Image (cartoon, helix red, strand yellow):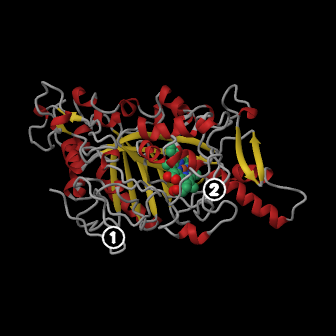
Amino acid sequence: MATQIVTSEANTAAVPGEALEFDDIQGLVFFGHGHLKYSRYVFLRMKDGKQARARAWLRTLLERKEVSTASGKQHPGLKDVKGEHALQVAFTYSGLKALGLSPEVMTTFLQEFREGMRDERRARILGDTGGSAPEKWQVGGDATMAHVVLVLFGKDDADLDVFHASHRDCYQEALEEVFIQDADMRQGDTEPFGFRDGISFPYIKGVPTTRGSDALGLPINAGEFILGYHNAYGQYPFSPRVPRSQDPGNLLPDVPRSQRVSGEPRPKDLGRNGTYLVIRKLRQDVAGFWKFVEENSRDPDKSAEENEANKELLAAKLVGRWRSGAPVELCPMKDDPTLGADSARNNHFEFRDDPYGVKCPLSSHVRRSNPRDTLVDDPQESIKLGSRHLIIRRGRPYHDKFADGAEEQGLMFVALNTNIGRQFEFIQQTWMNNPKFSDLYDSKDPIAGDNYDPEYPGDEPKDYTAVVPGFPVRQRLTGLPRFVHTRGGDYFFLPGIKALRYLSMERTP
Ligand code: HEM
């Protein structure tokens, strides 16, 4: 039965939807554990012959109720989450295979997940080429592939170390660490280029929220983000399933009747209350970004102050929001920090009155990653179509410091969705990396697009532009370099708690 969730007074009521089984859903789906500023991604690989130990480790996690859910003791309410620590656990395709899932079950996962992010075709779809190609990755490439990711959250570094060490004691016999990445929010919710992040979120039916909704306010069916519920098409998303005979303990719920293939004897739903987790380590060339912006906004005839203002303006036009988070669509020439901080207003905008991008350029990151009411002529229809290409983002910035004094900054980009191809990959491929997006012809997303990369054979700077209409006159920037480089990543399955229990059960190979 679905748990009643307690919410703080500030929360608006949930838009009615299907009753979500909050205590079976990992907490990350609903919140980013923002009160715990430090996080660590521990990528693990099962040791040979240690499958049984790995399953025993999972059972221990469950017995100790270590996996954070959206309710229960750790999380009495969606907004009142104040646990001391949080932990989420997810698996790659090869991880599930290594845990001993049968071939019949493995084939029921999404193709994108089965192939993995490093797959040649998927890499091309994502623009992971040249310097961002999987063979150069720190994690997730052929030699650095993980089976499991543990995402740990704590209040500071020392606390996280202790939390991590306590878990290492439990898993180290079965799993070895492939890669560890820290990411934290000590700078608040600002990403490394200096812009406030984590503002726009889908408005999900059945989930209380304090956030203002999109202007046309279309609440989305939960099945876009959680398996086992209706999606934006009013259908159940594809969910991995288990033949009834392979769940003798009856741990899993039945696959809904409408989802059964005729003749299939009542299969069990392994996906329900789970989802797919996209993790990408994205390096940001912060110095390169600001150098490019400065070179393209400096006017020798203007004062230093005017040039500084122009620099901020151009950067905001490329992102689609000012540093404060205020949308350039609402304040096109000057930042409005009050608006940026006002969650009731800072996501309340559309683009249909700005068809040429004079306020918010067509190519800006925010406009490309969510074109809102401008996909087709009818704004309502546009919002409806767009609602099929949304993701929940849970990324956090990282700042690596190396022994030789070198430093690297970027984003541990994290997205949740139930259909990787139609949601995450679609945004990256069809909107961000598409030179012909919205009647443009040779520009890509200036922030997250696969722009000019000298390491990609045949790439020419002249082929990459960004057009900024009305800045203060129309400006065409050529030779747009790639400011964001992929350093690793993979697709994971983030199971519900019942599914985790199923995965932890002993099974004969
Ligand atoms: C290092 C790379 C990236 C940076 C620095 C970045 C930065 C930002 C910033 C500053 C915002 C505006 C704040 C907000 O609305 O939350 C934003 C929004 C967004 N980004 Fe990114 N982003 C990056 C990569 C990506 C990627 C890879 C995707 C998906 C493929 C993505 C999808 C989105 C979406 C969907 C929005 C919200 C758009 C809206 O609804 O208005 N971003 N990003």
Q: Pick the residue in front: 411 or 415.
A: 415
Please identify the residue farthest to the front as the structure is shown. 378
Q: Pick the residue in front: 240 or 221.
A: 221
What amino acid type should be assigned to the residue bearing mark 2? Phe
Q: Quadrant of the N terminus?
A: bottom left
Tell me the residue at 40%/32% (across/down). Answer: 112
Q: Name above or below for residue 128 compared with residue 484.
A: above
Q: Is residue 481 visible?
A: yes
Pointer 2 and pointer 1: residues touching (CB < 8 Å)?
Answer: no
Q: Which mark is residue 193?
A: 2
Tell me the residue at 23%/52% (across/down). Answer: 18
Q: Is mark 1 within 8 Å of ligand 1?
A: no
Please count the marks in the image: 2
User: Which of the 4 image quarters holds residue 207?
Assistant: bottom left
Mark 2: give few (<14), some (14-19) or many (20+) Cα within 10 Å. some
Is label 2 in a helix, a strand or a loop? loop
Q: Is mark 2 within 8 Å of ligand 1?
A: yes
Q: Pick the residue in front: 44 or 497.
A: 497
Q: Which mark is residue 80?
A: 1
